[in-house]
Amino acid sequence: MTPITTIPDAILEGSTPTISGTLTNKAGAAIPLASLLTLKLTLYSMSDSSFPIINSRDAQDVKNANRVTVGDNGELSWNLDPVDSSILNQALGHETHRAIFAWTYDEGSVEQTGKQIIDFKVKNLQKG
């Protein structure tokens, strides 16, 4: 089962916080950047049954690109773009956005995969 991390504090609409973590293998060890083959990000709204994609982040390549950096020891840092924290439905006081990071890595000449889900609430500033 893919782990889900829920960020407890709401992110303000249009803000640019940084979400960080570490890319790990199945044993829980950090994946060195040199072993990381691919890193993709999908971002969508969970507050709409059609699950609309946010900011064109649909399996977007983010390996040291598109406001995501990965350090030599697998440290991941995602500096959100204001559009990543936009409210799609202005009738809601907040929306839940889901980010899915999926990666492939080389482990002893064998390609492996990993995935992490991050859920966060975005507060609609127009709703107070």
Image (cartoon, rainbow, N blue to C red):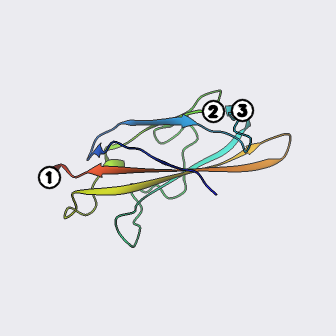
Crowd rating for badge 1 (residues with CA inside 10 Å; few <14, some 14–19, many 20+): few
Q: Amino acid at mark 3?
A: Ala
Q: Amino acid at mark 1?
A: Gln
Figure disc tally = 3
- Tell me what residue is drawn at x 58 percent, y 41 percent: 63
- Which quarter of the rendering shows the N terminus? bottom right
- Tell me what residue is drawn at x 39 percent, y 63 percent: 46
Q: Residue furthest front?
A: 8
**Residue holding disc 2:** 74
- Percent from the top left, x then y, of residue 95? 31, 57
Q: Amino acid at mark 2?
A: Gly
Q: Is residue 21 above or below residue 91?
A: above
The residue tagged with tag 1: helix, strand or loop? helix
Toward which corner of the image does residue 51 lie, by quadrant?
bottom left
**Residue holding disc 1:** 126
Q: Is residue 30 above or below residue 55?
A: above
**Residue holding disc 3:** 34
Q: Which mark is residue 106?
A: none
- Percent from the top left, x then y, of residue 21? 54, 36
Q: CA gap, disc 2 to disc 3?
A: 9 Å
- Percent from the top left, x then y, of residue 38? 65, 46
